[in-house]
Structure formats: structure tokens, C-alpha cells
Image: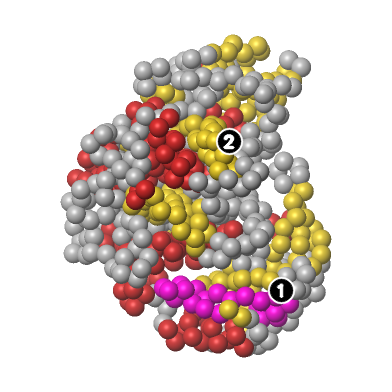
């Protein structure tokens, strides 16, 4: 990672005995103006990530995930992984001693020796790592200014420790960075919707004629009011034979929901699902609490592109898994701390370290994204490789903007992309295409193109093509220019499910009253790849039911099934597609708008939807019983 630019702060000379490591200033720093220094007395908790034997661990992870190998599904316990591939106790001790000597306190290594954390005032952190921590102002794509905190350059550690350090997290509170493989979307916030927006209970229940036509579209359907569990189950063929019994799905979150088990119970009742048992849901806290949490990672996507009135991310995750796998156990891990990225990574890691003898779950659904450059990529890679070696599948949302993120592009993650899904009156799949909506706004009788919003995807500039993608991902989507050479690299996503806010689900939530007690059960439409990810996780739990071992790192199995009946091959919108299935009409107070589905405008995205594998939807979406049976057969 390149050193961060110094913006308005004096350079800090590095002693000859120190060298820079990953932990640079946020990419946003380069386009920002310095507002001022962060208070020297402000306290930070940083994590210095230790370097495991990544090469050896990756070789082992490939073997345990590949059918036919002698090690297939012979996973390691968390303690065994640490002993075999983790950093040594001596390295962790040396790092802890250095942090203590530099004046930091509460120095401790996590149970798997993945990192050493420490706390101290900004002044002490700056002195220890040779940086200045400032506040910066940047103008976002929506034209609004955001102030964030970041170190101004790469952190430095003693040369004797540097070979054992992957990177450092916890100094910043940066806003989302631009995507790697596409220009940022020009689409700004939509105008406020009417109090009671018109929507449909099923796709094309209500159709609006467009005057004048937009991009050749003369009709568009009103968005759905939020699909029910019954509708979404029918669309992906979930069965009542395979319901995830005996499986545990972990959900990592940045905030604890209000009365989640009661919410889940109410959701089940209103959706005619079996009531959850108290033993099926458990919520735990990872890390420490923070009085003023930051929100720099992905936020939930509300229906019709509106900002959500409530943060119902955790509720949507839990309900999506429950809709697909109502008999599975759920473990909700809520990350703590004042740096959201760090808290989420800590929550993801907590599932893997478990009780030392076993990880806490075999499926981990992570409905969040971290932009490229915001954390050292090797920290995410180390977590994902550990997961694969332990038999835990890491499922990451591909993000709700075109391009890649540090979390979805790792080759040991299953990246879940998004689709636009039409479900008809008889719960039939009317259409499904890649989620990439071109939003047009109608003002004074004229349409204006506001840009594209949609799911993430593309080709990595960092990771080479993993073995499981060979022969499946076409050269047109796997080849990328890296410097002066053309490389064949990792393509994203791997699989997909419904994510378009115009075709989202009806999410239930409970908010606290003014007295602090849980209020009544309420509902709101919601979507995003934050929906697609837990939908896939739930279906994987169904497939694992009754199997001798967990699928773990499932990518090799997924790609073995590419092109078979296990998947709906998601195709681009054709001119022969009925106009009401090519877009959604968005009524609003001041103006109306329309989302044209499956836009592939290069000004906004370099992704495509195509026959076979594509960078919008991967190998496709699950096809019910054929998907479950295919995974089980591929895992033999």
C-alpha cells in the first residue's frame, strides 16, 4: 500500500530503526482538505494485526475445500489453527512489550493471536506509529461535505517487528471510498417520496404509462411494498423438508437491535412461519462499547432508494435467514468499539476463534462492506483464510455501489451480488436480472439521467484468479490491466440473490419507546446486497442439514455447479422483455422517476449481466431443490 500524502501537517521523521507497514491514510485523504488536528487527549483503541503463515494456511484451506483431496473437510479447530499457522507467542509478546514501552495501556492479544490491541491518547498513538491524526473535509458524490478522521501517512513500527505485522487499524473514521473498478455513481439522493407512496403486493400488480418514454421505456411497474417470506421462499424454491435444522448461522452486526427475538417471533407470526424457539437465537457482544459509535461502513438500503427511517439492518439479516432456514440456529455477534470497521472485523473473527475447540458457527453472514484502502487488505485475507481452514463459510455482501470492496474481492470469501426480482401473483418468478438501476428523474416534462445504482462486482487488481474460477469465468471478465501487464484475476461476485430496493422484502422491527421499553412491531421495505447475503446463507444452511460435515469454504462447490440446473442463469434485459418488467416507476411529491433495470452504462459501471458467469450476478441465483441437491452431491 502506498504511503499516504501529507496534507497540511508537518512530516514526522522516521528513525532508521522503523519501517512503514500497511495502515495508510484513507484514500479519501488525497481528495480532502485538512480541517485540523484531532485532540491530543482523545483516546483510541488500535489493533496491530500479526502475520500468520498465510501461504501454508492457504494451501491447507484449498485442500480441505477441494473434493477428492486427502484433507477434504478435515478442518482444524481454532486452537489447532493458531498452533499450526498462527503467529508465534513470542512475536505477540514482543509486539505487546513494544506497545507498552511506548506508553499504550490495556495491551492484550486476542485468543487466536491474530492481533494485539492497545489503548491510549492520540498523542501517544501518533508518537508510537510516526503519524499525525487529523480531521479532513471531503465533498461526497451527493455534493455534501463530510468530516472524517484519519492518520496522514503509513504507520511505522520497529524494523525488528515489521516482518510480523500485517497492518494497523483503528486510527480513522473515514467515509466510504470510491470503488476500484468503476467510476463513482453520479446518482444523488432522490427527492422525498409522498407520505403514502403507491406500491404493489406482487410484481406488475400496478403498471404506469410513461409520458414521455424514458430510454425507450413506455411502461413501468410500481415497486413492490416488500415481499413476504412466502414470496421470497417460492422464488428460490425453499422447501419444508430442508429448513436448516442442526445448523448455526452467525450474523455480524455493528449495532444491537431492539428486542430481536421478539421481533423474530412477530415476523414469523405475520409471515405464517413456525414460531422460533428461544434456543434458536442468541446475541453476544464482541469488543468494547463506545458512547459515540462511528458509521463508516455500509448502511442499509431502503426501498425505492430512500434513506431508511430506522436502521433495521440486523433485523433484515435475521429475518432473511429465518425466511430461508426457519429451523436453523442464529448467533448474532455485535461488534463493539468506536471504529466501526475494526469492530466489524473483530466480530467476524470472534466467530472463528469460538471457544478454542470449535468455531461458533459454520456459516457466517456479513452484510457489510469495507471500501478498498480503508483497512489493510491482508487483515481481511487472514481472517478469511483462517475461516476456510476451520470449515467456516465467509459470506460477504458485494456492496451497494458498482465496483469492488476489500471484503468482497478476497478469494476466500463467497461474494454475494444482487438482482432485481419480479415475483408474480402466483408467487412465480416473472423475471430476474442484474441489479443495476439507471434512475431517470422527470422534471417539467423532461427526463434527466441521474446515474446508476446497483450491486458491486468486477475484477480485482490484487488477487490472481483462484483455482475454482478457472474454466468458468470468461477471459473478458477475468483479464485486467495491472500496471503494464494483463493479468487473469479474481472476478466478483460468486453468486447472487434479490437486492434491488424496488423488489425488496418487508422487514419487521421494534423501536424503543421514550421510556426505553420495546415498542410495537412495525414493518418497512428494505433491500440491498445486505438482503442477498443472508438469503444465500440461509439456503446454504438448508443444504448442510443432515450432512456429515459443514461445506465450509463453499466456492469450489459453487463453481463445480456452474451451468447446471442448480442455478437460475441471470440474463440481461432484452428488447423483447415486456416493458413492465424492464423498470420501476417511482412516484414522488415534487417529481416522478423511473428505474430502468440492468443498465450497463460504462460511465457508471464496468459490470455486465451476461449468459453464464457475469460480474453482476456471478454464476446465478439458487434454484431450490436442485441447488440443495447439487451442493450435497458436489461435496461427496
Q: Image point 41% across, 82% down: which residue?
A: 88
455 is higher (above) or lower (below) than 412:
above
Which residues, given as a range, are shown in magenta? 107-129
- Residue 301 position, x and y percent, is 57, 39
Instruction: Determine the image quadrant of residue 46.
Output: bottom right
Q: Nearer the viewer, residue 447 or 370?
A: 370
Q: Decide if residue 252 is in sight here.
A: yes
Mark 2 closeness class: few <14, some 14–19, many ≥20 residues within 10 Å: many
According to the picture, the residue beneath numbered tag 1 turns out to be 122
Q: Residue at x 54, y 13 (%)?
A: 207
Secondary-structure class at tag 1: helix
Between 368 and 259, the residue placed more toward the observer is 259
> Could you tell me which residue is drawn at 59 percent across and 58 percent down?
340
Q: Secondary structure at mark 2?
A: strand
For residue 302, which numbered disc appears in the image? Answer: 2
Evaluate if marks 2 and 1 touch, with contact meaning CB atoms under 8 Å apart.
no
User: Where does the image place residue 141, in percent across and percent down from the top left?
Assistant: 70, 43
Between 429 and 33, the residue placed more toward the observer is 429
Amino acid at each position: 500500500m502506498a504511503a499516504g500524502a501529507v496534507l497540511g501537517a508537518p512530516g514526522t521523521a522516521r528513525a532508521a530503526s522503523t519501517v512503514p507497514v500497511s495502515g495508510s491514510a484513507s484514500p479519501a485523504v488525497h481528495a480532502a482538505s485538512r480541517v485540523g488536528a484531532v485532540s491530543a487527549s482523545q483516546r483510541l483503541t488500535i489493533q496491530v494485526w500479526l502475520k500468520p503463515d498465510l501461504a501454508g494456511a492457504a494451501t491447507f484451506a484449498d485442500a480441505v475445500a477441494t473434493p477428492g483431496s486427502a484433507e477434504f473437510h478435515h478442518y482444524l479447530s481454532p486452537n489447532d489453527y493458531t498452533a499450526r499457522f498462527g503467529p508465534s507467542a513470542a512475536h505477540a509478546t514482543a509486539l505487546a512489550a513494544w506497545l507498552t514501552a511506548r506508553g499504550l495501556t490495556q495491551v492484550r492479544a486476542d485468543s487466536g493471536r491474530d492481533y494485539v490491541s492497545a489503548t491510549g491518547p492520540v498523542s501517544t498513538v501518533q508518537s508510537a506509529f510516526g503519524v499525525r491524526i487529523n480531521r479532513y473535509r471531503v465533498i461526497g458524490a451527493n455534493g455534501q461535505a463530510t468530516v472524517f478522521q484519519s492518520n496522514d501517512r503509513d504507520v511505522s513500527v520497529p524494523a525488528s517487528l515489521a516482518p510480523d505485522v500485517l497492518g494497523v487499524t483503528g486510527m480513522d473514521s473515514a467515509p466510504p471510498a470510491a470503488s476500484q473498478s468503476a467510476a463513482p455513481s453520479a446518482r444523488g439522493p432522490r427527492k422525498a417520496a409522498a407520505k403514502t407512496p403507491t406500491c404493489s403486493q406482487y410484481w406488475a400488480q400496478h403498471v404506469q404509462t410513461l409520458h414521455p418514454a424514458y430510454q425507450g421505456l413506455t411502461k413501468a411497474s410500481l415497486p413492490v411494498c416488500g415481499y413476504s417470506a412466502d414470496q421470497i421462499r417460492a422464488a428460490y424454491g425453499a422447501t419444508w423438508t430442508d429448513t436448516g435444522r442442526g445448523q448455526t448461522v452467525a450474523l455480524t452486526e455493528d449495532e444491537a437491535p431492539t428486542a430481536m427475538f421478539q421481533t423474530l417471533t412477530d415476523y414469523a407470526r405475520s409471515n405464517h412461519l413456525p414460531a422460533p424457539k428461544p434456543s434458536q437465537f442468541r446475541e453476544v457482544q464482541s469488543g468494547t462499547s463506545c458512547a459515540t459509535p462511528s458509521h463508516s461502513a455500509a448502511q442499509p438500503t431502503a426501498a425505492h432508494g430512500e434513506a431508511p427511517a430506522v436502521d433495521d439492518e440486523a433485523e433484515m439479516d435475521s429475518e432473511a435467514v429465518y425466511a430461508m432456514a426457519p429451523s436453523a440456529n442464529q448467533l448474532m455477534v455485535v461488534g463493539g468499539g468506536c471504529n466501526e470497521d475494526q469492530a466489524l472485523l473483530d466480530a467476524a473473527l470472534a466467530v472463528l476463534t469460538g471457544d478454542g475447540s470449535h468455531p461458533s458457527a459454520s456459516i457466517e453472514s456479513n452484510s457489510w462492506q469495507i471500501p478498498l484502502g480503508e483497512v489493510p487488505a491482508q487483515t481481511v485475507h487472514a481472517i478469511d483464510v483462517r475461516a476456510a481452514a476451520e470449515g467456516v463459510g465467509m459470506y460477504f455482501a458485494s456492496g451497494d455501489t458498482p465496483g469492488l470492496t476489500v471484503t468482497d474481492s478476497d478469494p476466500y470469501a463467497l461474494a454475494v451480488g444482487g438482482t432485481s426480482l419480479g415475483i408474480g401473483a402466483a408467487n412465480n418468478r416473472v423475471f430476474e436480472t442484474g441489479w443495476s438501476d439507471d434512475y431517470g428523474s422527470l422534471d417539467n416534462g423532461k427526463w434527466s439521467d441521474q446515474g446508476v445504482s446497483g450491486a458491486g462486482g468486477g475484477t480485482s487488481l490484487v488477487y490472481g484468479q483462484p483455482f475454482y474460477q478457472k474454466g468458468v469465468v470468461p477471459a473478458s471478465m477475468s483479464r485486467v490491466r495491472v500496471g503494464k501487464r494483463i493479468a487473469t484475476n479474481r472476478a466478483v461476485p460468486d453468486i447472487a440473490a434479490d437486492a434491488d430496493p424496488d423488489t425488496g422484502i418487508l422487514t419487521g422491527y421494534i423501536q424503543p419507546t421514550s421510556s426505553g421499553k420495546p415498542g410495537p412491531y412495525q414493518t418497512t421495505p428494505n433491500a440491498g446486497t445486505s438482503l442477498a447475503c443472508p438469503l444465500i446463507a440461509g439456503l446454504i444452511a438448508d443444504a448442510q442439514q443432515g450432512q456429515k460435515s459443514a461445506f465450509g469454504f463453499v466456492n469450489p462447490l459453487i463453481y463445480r455447479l456452474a451451468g447446471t440446473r442448480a442455478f437460475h442463469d441471470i440474463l440481461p434485459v432484452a428488447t423483447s422483455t415486456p416493458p413492465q418488467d424492464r423498470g420501476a416507476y417511482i412516484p414522488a411529491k415534487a417529481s416522478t422517476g423511473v428505474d430502468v433495470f440492468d443498465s450497463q452504462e460504462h460511465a457508471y459501471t464496468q459490470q455486465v449481466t451476461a449468459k453464464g458467469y457475469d460480474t453482476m450476478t456471478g454464476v446465478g441465483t439458487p434454484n431450490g431443490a436442485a441447488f440443495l441437491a447439487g451442493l450435497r452431491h458436489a461435496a461427496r
